Amino acid sequence: MIKIEHSVFALPFAMIGMIYAASGWPGWRTFLLIVLAMVSARSAAMAFNRIVDRDIDAKNPRTATRHLPSGKLTLASAWMFFLSSVGFFLLAAALLNALALMLAPIALAVMLGYSYTKRFTWLSHIVLGLSLGIAPAAAWVAVTGTFSWTPALWILSVACWTAGFDILYALQDDEFDRQHGLKSIPARFGKRAAIAISRSLHMLAVVFLVSAGIAVGAGALYFVGCGFAAALLIYEQSLVKADDLSRIDMAFFTLNGYVSIGVFVFALCDVIFRL
């Protein structure tokens, strides 16, 4: 039901927040606890989404074969997995520092609350973006134990990037969403306008990513990574057209994985070469 690669979108950005907060390597303990927190939080959020949406998924031909609506997993086992994931997340936060534990319920509220937003607002994509966007800020707190506005631009960048590619993914379900009263930008504005909104969000994502690098005093390699991300996003947008969604999986899963990992690799090299 939950694939480990689903963590690849937010985890690299959490690592970016971690290395710049620590000005290098934070130590194995902090690193492993951040990874545990990220993977368990992502797993909890996705499990909760599958639980909440199981009846909707059963009606949608694209999602009817998922584990819960198809009966491959029981509802009880999904709840057990969800609660275990929440437990690991809270444990990791507690072992990191007091502020991380204090903020953990707020992070959970954002991540879990997303699952209900599509029922009442077409801004659900933005909420999803925020749920991933808090990753670099959360890692910053994990390392420093203090609140800072420094990673705020990364939050905005990841939020815009995530919302942009989620809008593209939602193009597949615009007719189903309208028929069943679900809210999304494609269902509200149509495919062509939705693609235009997605492109605008991706442009903003790059602007915020560059601005975040300036704010933390990043070196040249970080900004090469920004250019790498921009090029991939341009290519991603070229793959999706209102009358041709045949390459949506490549645009959604493959390229966005390269974006997050690529930006992290350039950021890591930037930090290493400046130590």
Image (cartoon, grey):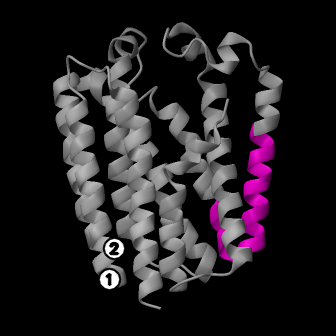
- Whether residue 149 appears in this view of the structure is no
Task: Look at 33% across and 73% down and name the residue there.
Answer: 222
Q: Is residue 8 left or right of residue 124?
A: right
Residue 88: image location, x then y, percent: 78, 54
The one nearer the camera, 186 or 24, is 24
Q: Are marks 2 and 1 in contact (CB under 8 Å)?
A: yes
| Whole-percent x, y for residue 268 in the image | 46, 74
Residue 80 occupies quadrant: top right
Report the residue marked by disc 2: 222
Q: Is residue 160 left or right of residue 84?
A: left
Mark 1 belongs to which amino acid? Gly
- Asked if one can make out residue 236 in the rendered structure from this viewpoint, the answer is yes
| Other residues around mark 2 within 10 Å, as few (<14) / some (14–19) / many (≥20) | many
Dot 2 amino acid type: Tyr
Dot 1: few (<14), some (14–19), or many (≥20) neighbours within 10 Å?
some
Q: Main secondary structure of the magenta part?
A: helix
Which quadrant of the rendered structure holds the N terminus? top right
- Disc number at residue 219? 1
Query: In the structure shown, which secondary structural element does the residue marked by tag 1 occupy?
Result: loop
Spatial distance from mark 2 to mark 1, Cα to Cα? 6 Å
- Residue 74 higher or lower than 262, as above or below: above
**Which range is magenta?**
82-104
Front-lying residue, 65 or 75: 65
